Amino acid sequence: MFTPYEIIRKKRDGEALSKEEIEYFVKGYTSGGIPDYQVSSLLMSIFFTGMSDEELLHLTRAMMATGVIVDLSDIPGCKADKHSTGGVGDKISLILAPLAAACGLKVPMVSGRGLGHTGGTIDKLESIPGFRTKMSIEDYKKILKKVGLVMSAQSDDLVPADRKLYALRDVTATVESIPLITSSIMSKKLAEGIDTLVLDVKVGSGAFMKNIDDARALAQKMVQVGKLYGKKVAVYLTDMSQPLGREIGNWSEVVESIKVLRGESDVEDVIELTVVLAAEMIALCSGENISNASERVRNALKSGAGYEKFIEMVRAQGGDVSVVEDLSKYPKPKIVREIKASASGCVTSIDTFKIGVAAVKLGAGRLKVGDKVDPVVGITVLKKIGDKVSSGDVIAIVHANEENIVKPVTDEILSAYKFSDAKPGKQELVKERIA
């Protein structure tokens, strides 16, 4: 017989937990028998003392065992998904999923909400009026079969342990933990019925992994877990030393994604990363070379097939298609404030973590469990690393609904920028591939 106290103490002291101890804690928390404060203590202990490979495998399995494993074998085609460890302005999934589906893949995507200073795909999608992210597994499969694409939140019966732990990690500063990130991502992905998985591990000031070694370690853990379950997994280490694209916020990132799919926006970093990751999904499924797969993705973007698939998905999941087609219909924020540079020179660095925190303070993310996000608030980033700036130039724009938060957020954004006379080297968006 175990007690939460004994398990917490054991992990606090750096000892390995047994399969039975891990299962006891995961089941107990999921059923409501172990309270938040004790789970928070265990999460913090894991954060500081880590987990062995064996513990990590037991944790992933225990989390999966709290719910159902989706069977998609009756749906023809290769089932492929992509997941990001989280970044600032990372709206890639919104563009990639419909493009991959337009290229013939089946894309069952179970996504999360905002976590810490990073945005969440589900929060972004729910900014579309009427868009339904919570659904039964039957509806999930029905939409996937009909559209070739479904983007949902975790259903009540899909890894419920992760849903509870995810929300608790968000508000207890225990997000940046390799075993906790790995078990969270892989338990969901292995349970959703996929054949292949492409992972985007962010590295840099706006990522949970601040350096390349930690990012590589996380990537290797996820590949290892995927291999044990017989799944084809590829991981890309990608740059998060500055926001992706220009928009940070929920509805504003949906708008930027729609404009990319329509061919109305040329945000190079967003398009480049989308093509790289979508092409890898196709290559893992079909066995064709990356060059041909990339060409297929670019053709789906250029022809508008990806946009049509996005519209089809929005309609199937109950969203208001008229707002997607006419973006001017959407409500506007009450306050729009320009942020001007206090110095001249080239932008040499951006503390992207600070930018993400500023967006959360505006209401684009959560400060505590249960907080509602404001879909219209956010930040537009006009100047990025390498751009020349003169004192007084507008470098960013704040979109807010509360006047009292504008000044502190503006100060935070300004402090995130560093300028120099020397132009910095080019930022490599894709740093490494691990498979």
Image (tube, rainbow, N blue to C red):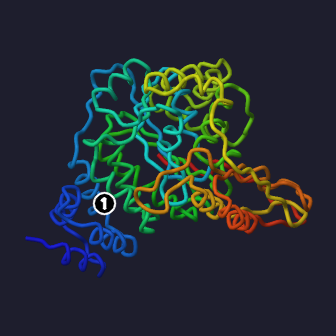
- Residue at the spot 71% in from the left edge and 51% down from the top edge: 335
Horizontal relation, residue 73 to residue 307: left or right: left
Q: Name the quarter where the N terminus is drawn.
A: bottom left
What amino acid is at disc 1? Leu
How many numbered marks, from 0 up? 1
Q: Position of residue 331 (x, y in %)?
A: 63, 38
Task: Please name whichever residue, 369 or 18, is drawn nearer the observer in this view of the structure.
Answer: 369
- Residue at the spot 33% in from the left edge and 58% down from the top edge: 165
- Residue at the spot 48% in from the left edge and 22% down from the top edge: 315
Task: Please name whichever residue, 409 or 348, is drawn nearer the observer in this view of the structure.
Answer: 409
Q: Quadrant of residue 180?
A: bottom left
Horizontal relation, residue 417 to residue 281: left or right: right
In this view, 28 is above or below 282: below
Horizontal relation, residue 323 to residue 418: left or right: left
Q: Position of residue 423 (x, y in %)?
A: 86, 60
- Residue at the spot 73% in from the left edge and 39% down from the top edge: 267
Task: Please name whichever residue, 426 or 42, is drawn nearer the observer in this view of the structure.
Answer: 42
Q: Position of residue 239 (x, y in %)?
A: 63, 53
Residue where numbered disc 1 is placed: 56
Helix, strand or loop for disc 1: helix
